[in-house]
Structure formats: C-alpha cells, structure tokens
Amino acid sequence: MKLFPIIPAAALCIAAAPAFAFDVQALTVMLEQAEYDEMSPLGMFMAADWVVKGVMLSLLFASVLVWVIFVARIMILRWERHTLRRRYRDLDRAGSLIAASALFAKREGVVGQMMRAAERERAASGEGARQKAGIKERAESEIARIEAGAARRMGLGAGILANVGSTAPFVGLFGTVWGIMNSFISISESNTTNLAIVAPGIAEALLATAIGLVAAIPAVIFYNILARSLGGYKVMLADAGALVERTLSRDLDLAAQEAAEALPAFQLGAVSAPAAE
C-alpha cells in the first residue's frame, strides 16, 4: 500500500527529466554566450568583480524574497479577512455567547479565541451580579491581547519589505561605487582613456544600481499596500472584539435579570411552606 503514492511521483520525475535536461542544456548555452557578449546583463554579471557579484546576488535574493512575502501575506490576509467577516456575522446572528458556543466549538480563528476567553473569564468569576463590571473589564483585557497577537502575526514580513525598500538602493550604490573604482584602476593600469576599455566596468557597476532599484521599488509599493490592508484588518479585529464584549455584557445583564425575577418567587415559596403545614 505504501508504494502507491511513490509510483505517481516517480512517473512525474521521469516525465520531467527531459525538460530538466533541456533547461540545463539551455542554461549552459546561455552562460557560454555570455562569456562572449560582455554587454548583455548576464555577460556583465559574469565579468563583474566578486564583490559586485555578491551585491547583485544579494539584491536578486532580496527581490525574490519581497515577492514571496507579499504574495503569501496578501493571500493569507484576504483569507483571514473573509473568515473574520463570516464569523462576525455568525456571532451577530446568534446574539448570545451560549447560543454561539456550539457553533464555534470546533472552529479555529480570532473570533473563536475571543469567545472562549470571554467564556473562561465568566466561568472563573462566577455568575454574581456584583461581579458583572469586573468580568467585563477582565474579558476586555484578554480580548485586547488576542487582537494584538492576531495583528502582530498578520504583520510578519512587513519589516523585511521596509528594510529592503530602504536599504536596497544603497546596497546597489555600494556595488556601483566598487565597480567604478575598479574601472578607474583599470584605466590607470592600461595608461589609456579609451571608452571601449572602461565601458564594460562602468556598465557592470550601473547594473548593480539597477538591480537595487528593481528590489527596492516593489518593496516600497508592497509595504504600502500591506500596511493599508493590515490597517483594515485591525479595524475588523476591533469590531469583532467589540461584538464579543457587547454579547458578553448582554448575557450578563440577562442572567442578572433572570436571577432578580426568580428571587421573589423563591422567597414567597419559602414563606408559604410553614403556613400550609
């Protein structure tokens, strides 16, 4: 039975082997052509100094990381906002934490965590009417911590976008300065100012700045988009927390009202029992 999942994977690897071999062969041809064409982007990278190569590779890695973080965060954020909106409607329709407890018993999410925190605080504090204000205050504190934790988890990766957006141009400028410095050294060693000699080195240096801008510009744009989306998500979290607090307050008021209505009937029964005897 354990062989069945392996067979499709092996078949897929065998089917993909010719395409992979073709890609490796095409990459080898591209590298060979780059050695002869020094003015192409790949040729400039191959001919660059090892420091400039390191700068270019780091900026390319940062650019890929920016795109991965942005796509992942936006997809997760949209899913969480959709789930939060649906859970909000479910709790609003239920109108009571007790009525919604069965609905949210097996559902993970921020609203479910808020509801369970409110129920735990209510159960730990008792049902006395005098404790109503204290229960709401303690539940509000716990719900605020849940909101802050959810917002912090959803904002993971935004700092990387900000760092790449602010530092990538300067990293690329460092590679440019280093490449131009090597070009001036080659001018002094060759004792000539022929542009054909120094142009490749200057082009390599400017390529580092271009890659830095390619990494920085999307990072700044993505950070602004993510910040606006996070702002809307925080507002939705605050609305959900306020709904849980209102529902808890309503449940406490209804419980106190039921207790007050049941108390006179209980006392009347206790007084009339000896008279009947």
Image (cartoon, grey):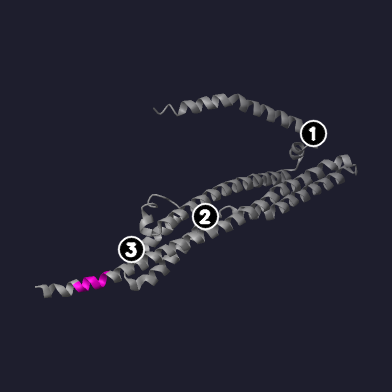
Amino acid, disc 1? Asp
Query: Tag on residue 231?
Result: none
Q: Considering the whole magenta stretch, tell me its main secondary structure.
A: helix
* Residue bounds of the magenta highlight: 262-268
**Vertical order, 162 against 48 (above or below):** below
At 89% from the left edge and 42% from the top edge, which residue is drawn? Answer: 195
**Vertical order, 25 against 52 (above or below):** above
**Foreground of the two, 174 or 74:** 74
Residue 142 visible: no
Image quadrant where one finds the C terminus? bottom left
Contact between labelled residues 3 and 1, with CB atoms less than 8 Å apart? no
Q: How far across and down, in percent of the image, does residue 100 sit?
A: 38, 55
Query: Tag on residue 37?
Result: 1
In the figure, residue 35 lies in which quadrant? top right
Contact between labelled residues 2 and 3, with CB atoms less than 8 Å apart? no
At 37% from the left edge and 64% from the top edge, which residue is drawn? Answer: 251
As measured in the structure, the alpha-carbon distance from the residue carrying label 1 to the one carrying label 3 is 75 Å
